[in-house]
Each structure stands twice: as structure tokens, then as C-alpha cells.
Image: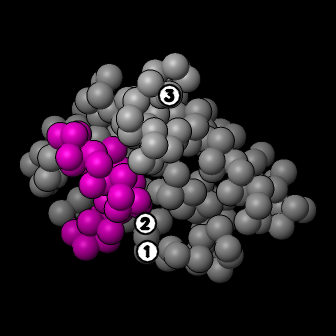
Amino acid sequence: MSIREKNIRLYFRKGIIVDTGPLILLLAGYYNYDSIGKSKLTAEFTKGDFDILTSFLSKFRKIIVTPHVLAEVSNLINTRVHKSVFADFIEKIIEKLSDFKEVYIQKDEIISREELKKVGITDTGILLACERDNNLILTKDFRFKGLCISKGLPVIHFDKLRAESWFS
């Protein structure tokens, strides 16, 4: 499903499922805004990306994550930030994490899907969460975006947010 501004607005009252890449940016920005773009964790992002992301996400009633996304995010933080910073990073983002709604997808649901072989556990879990509740998906993964579109699921790529200004 190609997402346009008017279509995205329909999801503001519902929620948005955030994939690993955008969630890394969001949490890293909450931890230390000035470090965005200066570490292995956020090298591909800018402070402007964080501003765009927070402005966009503020429009939604709920920010939704899956346990699989949270595990990926934790593992990436643990491997990309200095060990002395990890505990402080986690401590500072706990409050923000508690604001998110978590949607749990059972393992058996995930492993029964053909998509698992294409995009893995995390993205298959996101796909199932979207099918269940019809929330918009935000990703930075072009392959996953393509799969969602082929399944008729509402998805937007983070680069589209960078290119558009309608949500400011």
C-alpha cells in the first residue's frame, strides 16, 4: 500500500509500529542528542533525522514495539556503544521504553510463516503485529518495506520522512 499524507493521518489515532533502525535513532537521541551521528550506533543519522522522527511520532496515539525489536535494539546498543556507557544508556531510556505499547507475537505464529525465510524473526513479528491490528509500520529496511507493500500492509520508509515536510 503506497502511503500518502492523507493515508498516514488515518493512523494517527491508532498507532505506529517502529522497526529497529528508527527505534535506535529515537532512543539514542533521548539518551544523548549531541552524540547522534558521532558513534557507531547512530553513524547513519543526523540530529535533523531525530527531530523529524520525534515530530512524526508525536502525531500518533501509540508507539508500538515487539519484543523482537527490543531485543535487536538492546543487542545493537550493547555492541555499538562503549561498555562503560551501556548501563547508563539503558538506565536513561527505561522511562521512554515504558511509554511504548508492546505487542507480543507467539513464536509458533512467526515460525509458521513463509516470510520468516525472507526477512527473519523480527520483521515477521512486525508483519504479524500489523496484520493483527492494522497499524502503520515505520522501517528503514527497503526489503522489508517491499514485502509489506506486496502484502498490502501500511508501511513508510524513514527516507520518505526525510524527503517530506508535510508532518512538520
Q: Which residue is mark 1?
A: 48
Q: Is residue 142 magenta?
A: yes
Q: Secondary structure at mark 1?
A: helix
Residues drawn in magenta? 137-165
Picture residue at 26% right of the left edge, 66% below the top: 160
Q: Quadrant of residue 49?
A: bottom left
In this rendering, is residue 46 above or below 89? below
Q: Nearer the viewer, residue 79 or 42?
A: 79
Q: Local crowd at mark 1 within 10 Å, few (<14), some, or many (≥20)?
A: few
Q: Earlier in the sequence, mark 3 or mark 1?
A: 1
Q: Position of residue 73 (x, y in %)?
A: 63, 50
Q: Secondary structure at mark 3?
A: helix
Q: Earlier in the sequence, mark 2 or mark 3?
A: 2
Q: Are marks 1 and 2 in contact (CB under 8 Å)?
A: yes
User: Can the viewer see residue 48?
Assistant: yes
User: Can the viewer see residue 100?
Assistant: no
Picture residue at 29% right of the left edge, 49% below the top: 147
Q: Which residue is mark 2?
A: 51
How far is disc 2 from disc 3 in space, using C-alphas? 36 Å
